Image (spheres, rainbow, N blue to C red):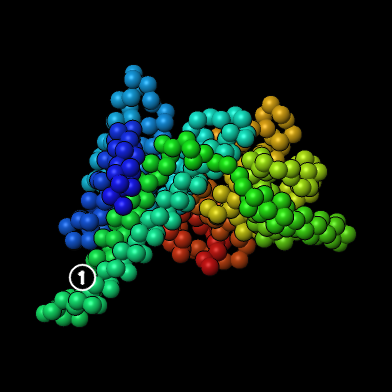
Amino acid sequence: MIKKLKRFLPDIAGAAGGSPVEIFVILLFSVYAVLMVEGVADGDRGYLALYPLSLSLSLLFNLWFRGKRLRFIYFLSALLPLSMAGCDLSGFVDSVAYPVSLMLCILMIFASKWRRDNIRYVKEGLFYVKNCVSALIIAGMTFGLTVAIYFSVRYIFPVQGLSDAESAGNMANAVLYFLIFSFMMLCPLLFLIFNRSEKGAWSSGRLDEIAVNYVVTPALLLYTCILYIYFAKILFTWSLPKGGIAYMVFAFTIIAILSQALRLTLKGKGTFEWFYGNFCVISLPALAMFWIGVWYRIAEYGFTQARVYLVVCGTIMTVTVLLSLSRRFGKYVYANLLAIILFALFTYVPGISAEDIERRSQMNRSLSADNGAVLAEEETVVTDAPWLYIVPKGEAVDLE
């Protein structure tokens, strides 16, 4: 056992030597989490939520700035979490910008090496996913075993002189410490160690082939038939598709694109080659229904943040499908770059952010409503919406 642990020490040393800023970020936020448990640090400012963002950015800077001349930029990235230590980040964490930021970090990691070869791009992305899942599984097992051992010891050898409330508090704190160690320290450290090993590069197996060729692909064919039948019904009855059809088409197309990407890594011959080879043409009716459904929902109810991001996702989806027609531009990394640009634009840029678009759309919808209360004396109206707006006298507004 000790010999096996000694073999693992060079991997830890290698990860620490090759990723010093990541190790610093891991320790910084782990210590902060411990201080939160002890009641020393404030947990209401949302600082701990910066952990995955800071770790992802340090990982990206480590990949981008490996040369000696620009290596200092990587080390300067350690200052980012320190500079935010005194800020109140609760507003950012509670907004839609936070999950979008997490997704952008993942997309940037996938595109970090700019692999224009689709097979290499997919294999490298799956390599990161495999390492992350492996680290999470080991961390989860570690957490479960340590908690089981701790509660067994507490049950067999109870601490005398403690009230029930004090005993429960101690056990709750112990569980939190095990969480911090397993998922905030061990899990990212394992991820860094796994990333250093080229032996763990993605290689598809028999299970992947069965899942893609005999489970996912037949399901996609069946779903394609259902969508075509529904499309024929729309043409026959000359009606608009239901608004929710956009979400169904989006899920169908994304799964088909992912399945098509996974097939590139399979060793054996794939089934239903004609389906994926002609997917761009096959998906055209589905894409048409998607955009008609989106237009219908927006025309009826206006823009919301969710619908803005649905349009962004639909644009990325449509461009990805159309790019597959070209051998030169049909690269997954181009779609990845487009996703990064669009999500960043409609999240962080004032005036065109999803929040601003929703505000203007819903305000205009309220102002253009025919039924409502007529303002006779006051020009300033306060509604249930979290903003104020000015309405000229005599205009009708919807106060619902």
Residue 161 in the image: x percent, y percent? Answer: 11, 79
Task: From the viewer's side, name the closer residue of 17 and 98.
Answer: 17
Is residue 57 found left or right of 399 in the rendered image? Answer: left
Residue where numbered disc 1 is placed: 170
What is the residue that sits farthest to the left in this orientation?
161
Residue at 50% x, 55% y: name it.
Answer: 391
Identity of the residue furthest to the right in this view: 236
Q: Nearer the viewer, residue 152 or 5?
A: 5
Q: In what element is the residue under mark 1?
A: helix
Vertical placement of 258 versus 172: above or below?
above
Question: Which residue sits furthest top?
Answer: 69
Specify the quadrant of the image occupied by residue 22. top left
Residue at 67%, 32% (x, y): give it.
330
Q: Is residue 264 left or right of residue 29?
A: right
Look at label 1 and name its amino acid.
Asn
Q: Residues within 10 Å of mark 1 (few under 14, many from 20)?
A: few
Residue 327 appears in view: yes
62 versus 25 height, above or below: above
- The image shows residue 2 at horizontal and vertical percentages of 28, 50
Please identify the quarter of the rendering in which residue 24 is found: top left
User: In the image, what residue occupies the spot 36% across and 64% down?
Assistant: 144
Q: Is residue 289 visible?
A: no
